[in-house]
Image (tube, rainbow, N blue to C red):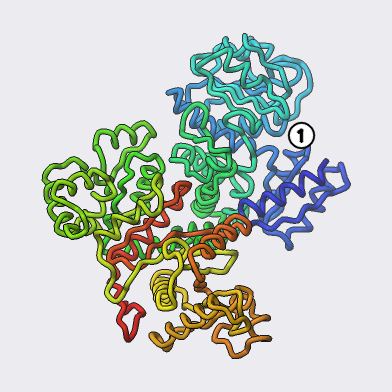
Amino acid sequence: AGKPVMEGKAVLFKRFADVNVFDIELATKDPDEFIRAVKLLEPTFGGINLEDVRAPECFYIEEQLQQQMDIPVFHDDQHGTAIISSAALLNGLELAGKSIEKVKVVFAGAGAAGIACANMMIALGVDPANVLMTDSKGVLYEGRGDSMNEYKQRYVRRTDARTLEDALKGADVFVGVSQANTVTREMIRSMANTPIVMAMANPDPEITYEEAVAARRDVIMATGRSDYPNQVNNVLGFPFIFRGALDVRARAINMEMKIAAARALADLAKQDVPDSVADAYGGERFSFGPEYIIPKPFDDRVLTHVAPAVARAAVETGVARHPIEDWDEYVEALQRRIKGTSHRVVRNLISQARRSSARRIVFPEATEEKILRACQVIVEEEIAEPVLIGDPTAIRERAHAIGLELRGTTIVDVNDETLLRRYAERLYELRQRHGVTPQQAPLLLSDPVYFGVMMVEQGEADGLVAGLHRSYPDTIRPALQIIRLKEGVRRVAGMYCVIVGDRVLFFADATVNIEPSPEELAEIAISAATIARNHFDVEPRVAMLSFSNFGSVHHEFAQRMRDAALIARSWIPDLVVDGEMAPDTALMPEIAQTNFPHSRIKGDANVLIFPNVQSGNISLKLVQRLAGADVIGPILMGLNRPVNVLNYYSSVNEIVNITALTAATAAVPVRHTPARRVAEV
């Protein structure tokens, strides 16, 4: 079974931490021969992960290789389980209100994993005198009479306990790495209050989750199974531990590095869990508690928590050849390894938002869980200053119910009479010739979106983000009625930033203008090009899309796009824009350069202007759903102050990203003039 296991681990190394791995199997049972073969590989590799090496030979092999080699050697069967279970122990004890120095711990299984777990938990603070270990013959006690290897000998104790049942009486913690069905309900009942039970035998645990919970309602339970809470899965460890060790060119993975990994995992489990994790687990939400004491394997944040902790411990203990100096940049580099171009784009927006002088962003849907969670991230990352609109009591109660404190967030009472009176007067002034009476203005302001837009119009907020539970038209209507258009702009339009692999594209208009004229298409193109350049650091190359290439089809639809390209060039002579052209001509150099060498677009278009909202929106959804594109938007272009609209399925991360864009654009005065419509920024 060694080959498929190692191949699978190689995939996990790459998938979770971007570590390249060769799986090598050795046809020997001689420990010294094994050691010599591995040692000869040292010049080729940055580290060695040992797998499927039985006890007690595994201890000898690892110790010898660590002494003889100047690269990390790590036996995952031992230390992976030890690190993850130690993280679970730390959080379990915190929930149980117990001190690690005082708890009694029982280990079932005296092989590689059992001894490694005991070693590590003692290193974390468990008193060795409070440890009992059992093997297939019972408790390791003085005078048992059989021959034990030196590693078991360390856990021989003077005790009257002879069986696992004896050992568990009054125990605070059970760590099982043995066989299925070796623990009964009665044994669980005999343990101390709020027992921590880690039954990690695979595929079936020492006691099932259902049995343990039925025996004790106060039990904190972990297993090796993904279908139960608190899965002790080694994939939470080895990819990230090696990533941190390799990034500082560590000579070894020492106990301090393993402890750092365990503490990082324990800390991460206490943080708010993003939507991406819930989505990976069927929408189930997780929060720190008895059923969530260790992170989930598909939590992308494990990389940026564990790898830096391991690397820092390597530096502090002197085993790093290349210490890291800029830790913030290191974390950013880790993010880029996994998330690629989309992460770079988002971090650029966040960096702009942090530098912005206009950071007060209004959220009218203030009791929505996603909004509240996003606001916490926004504050923690210093992206903006969230302003929540609504009933202050309801907002605080909702935040408390999901475990948030709303630090750094302003709450504005939608029923504040002073604000309502002032906003109503201004709203009537703006809309008195559009059917709004003095009596209707206060009624409109009972809608938090109208209220929020008035805050922006009055300069008391810098931008607005809304739309989780409203249609797109209903969300933008108050903004269109109240907030002025930018100078030189005649109508708003919607754009998306679409990231496919390493390619950053902009789709417009995909949300607002049903059937735009050539002049309107030209204006949309210039607005999109402006945002691409100013906020995404992309030099715009604009393609007017059609089913026709440069007059190949004579039809009014194609002519409209041809005219739009000419108009845009007449307004902005140095803007790279051409068309009409088909999407493959716009995006594929081999087609554009071979068949249309006259085109200003050489298959390198990045701003794609669609003939109408229908084609734009359909294309966006197809690319997003079939090609797995990352999407930022919709971005509403043309208003004097930024208002951006969410989708009903927007995740917390997507809300954070659009907020960053809103804050970044809020401080930038963009003007369009008939002579030159690109922003002067």
Q: Nearer the viewer, residue 623 or 68?
A: 623
Residue 249 occupies quadrant: bottom right
Residue 485 occupies quadrant: bottom left
Q: Residue at x 20, y 41 (%)?
A: 413
Visible residue check, residue 156:
no
Residue closest to the far right:
27
Query: With 454 as the anchor, is 326 left or right in this view?
Result: right
Query: With 298 as the anchor, is 384 left or right in this view?
Result: left
The residue beneath circle 1 is 56
Across and down, in percent, residue 592 comes to 63, 82
Quadrant containing the N terminus is top right
Query: Which amino acid does the dot numbered 1 rest on?
Result: Pro
Q: Residue at x 31, y 49 (%)?
A: 363
Residue 494 occupies quadrant: bottom left
Q: Nearer the viewer, residue 263 or 33?
A: 263
Query: With 675 as the anchor, is 302 left or right in this view?
Result: right
Q: How many marks?
A: 1
Across and down, in percent, residue 491 comes to 34, 69
Query: With 223 as the anchor, is 112 left or right in this view?
Result: right
Q: Nearer the viewer, residue 50 or 354?
A: 354
Q: Is 216 situated above or below 230?
A: above
Q: Residue at x 59, y 59 (%)?
A: 622
